[in-house]
Image (cartoon, helix red, strand yellow):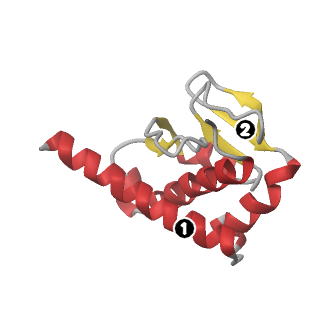
Amino acid sequence: MEPGADTIALTEAAFRIANERMAKWPERYTNSPVEAYFCECGDRQCRARVLLSRDAYEAVRQDSRRFLIVPGHEKPTVESVIESYGTYEVVEKLPDVLAIVTEADPRQRRSGAARDEAETTATAIQDEARSDRDDAAG
């Protein structure tokens, strides 16, 4: 059963927060013009990555309503695909969940329950991804 619209929006916001955190790491752009970003879809278990440049990522991030996903990961109950680039798509949130993703957007500097929950989930996503990476290297 698919989660409700609010849960999907919070999950997507959490992936975006995780990407924002990683984008600040100075070592991200020392060796390559492209980096791996989490797919910002509503599936909490998704670990797909999107390879793109910092400029392409920033183009998506200029609008709080927009998220970066792997093609086919859109959730029509909360978003519409507005751009497609082969290896990734840009989706825009529908009005029903706009307040959630705006509150949770780290660039908006807002606080509230949505922000707190998204931050907590982002930390869990990063910890799980780190553990998966360590297990694979293992």
Comes first in the chain, label 2 or label 1: 2
Q: Residues within 10 Å of mark 1 (few under 14, many from 20)?
A: many
Q: Nearer the viewer, residue 47 or 85?
A: 47
Distance, label 2 to label 1, CA atoms, is: 21 Å
Residue on which the image places disc 2? 91
Rendered image quadrant of residue 112 = bottom right
Instruction: Please tell me how crowded label 2 is: few (under 14), some (14-19), or many (20+) other residues with Cα within 10 Å.
Output: many
The amino acid on which the numbered mark 1 sits, given as a three-letter code, is Glu
Tag count in the figure?
2
Q: Are marks 2 and 1 in contact (CB under 8 Å)?
A: no
Measuring 64% from the left and 56% from the top, which residue is drawn there?
10
* Location of residue 21 in the rendering, given as x and y in whole percent from the top left corner: 48, 63
Task: Give the quadrant of the N terminus.
Answer: top right
Taking the spot 44% from the left edge, 64% from the top edge, the residue there is 123
Q: For the residues carrying marks 2 and 1, which lies nearer the camera in this image?
A: 1
Q: Work out whether 123 lies above or below 9.
A: below
Residue placed under numbered mark 1 in the picture: 119
**Position of residue 30 in the picture relative to residue 19 (left or right):** left
- Residue 16 placement, left or right of 98: left
